[in-house]
Image (tube, rainbow, N blue to C red):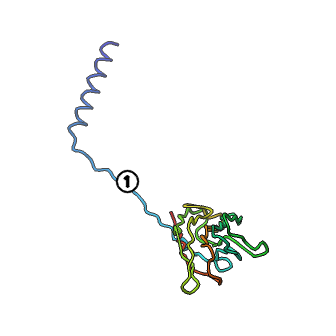
Amino acid sequence: MKKFVSGLLVASYLALSVCALQPAQAASATGSATAEIVSPICLMGVNGGVLKFGQIVPGTGGTICVAPDNSRHNSNGVQVVSTSSFAAAQFQVNGAANAAISIAIPQTLTINNGVNSMLVDGLTSMPYGTGMLDANGRCNIFVGGTLHVRPNQALGVYSGNFTITVAYN
């Protein structure tokens, strides 16, 4: 038995030595490439995408905040006409199902009535920064902000534009 094991060890050594002396053989594998074409993002304002602060009595000045959840708060000497309509701006995104998106909104904007103006700042959105399209490839974005009203602000209708940008993440 001892001779058999010794012979087996010698044969194994010789086989390994012969394999080591053989030239290296080439090996290959097959890879693949894939691509999926998806719908481009479509963004549209619902009801014009208008951020509405409502009717305001300026008084001694102050702020009106319309939040993305459609709540409204006023501060200092500004009064809102309680029956006036207000709303966060609403946008609908359409694109690829279950896709992640990024949302960019400006920090400020100015609304004007001729030579008179008011600042809107604190713009925020819901969702904010990033979001997800649902299984149907849709998502609603709501934008709110804070309007700064000066004491004895000139009467009239004020308006201005802002740009919201949405992209696939």
Percent position of residue 138, x then y: 64, 68
Check disc 1: other Cα within 10 Å, few if <14, some if 14-19, many if 20+.
Answer: few
State the image quarter where residue 2 is shown.
top left
Percent position of residue 106, x then y: 52, 69
Q: How many marks?
A: 1
Q: Quadrant of the N terminus?
A: top left
Q: Nearer the viewer, residue 129 or 149?
A: 149
Q: Residue furthest bottom?
A: 114
Is 154 rendered above or below residue 60? below
Q: Is residue 131 left or right of residue 85?
A: left
State the image quarter where residue 95 is shown.
bottom right
Q: Residue furthest right?
A: 83
Residue drawn at point x = 57 percent, y = 66 percent: 123
Any part of residue 6 in sight: yes
State the image quarter where residue 5 is shown.
top left
Q: Residue furthest top?
A: 2
Any part of residue 141 in sight: no
Residue drawn at point x = 47 percent, y = 66 percent: 35
Q: Which residue is mark 1?
A: 29
Q: Nearer the viewer, residue 87 or 137?
A: 87
Disc 1 is placed on an element classified as loop
What's under tag 1, amino acid-wise?
Answer: Ala
Q: Nearer the viewer, residue 6 or 167?
A: 167
Percent position of residue 111, x then y: 57, 78
Q: Is residue 103 left or right of residue 87?
A: left
Residue drawn at point x = 61 percent, y = 61 percent: 127
Is 116 rendered above or below residue 61? below
Q: Nearer the viewer, residue 168 or 153?
A: 153
Residue drawn at point x = 53 percent, y = 73 percent: 109
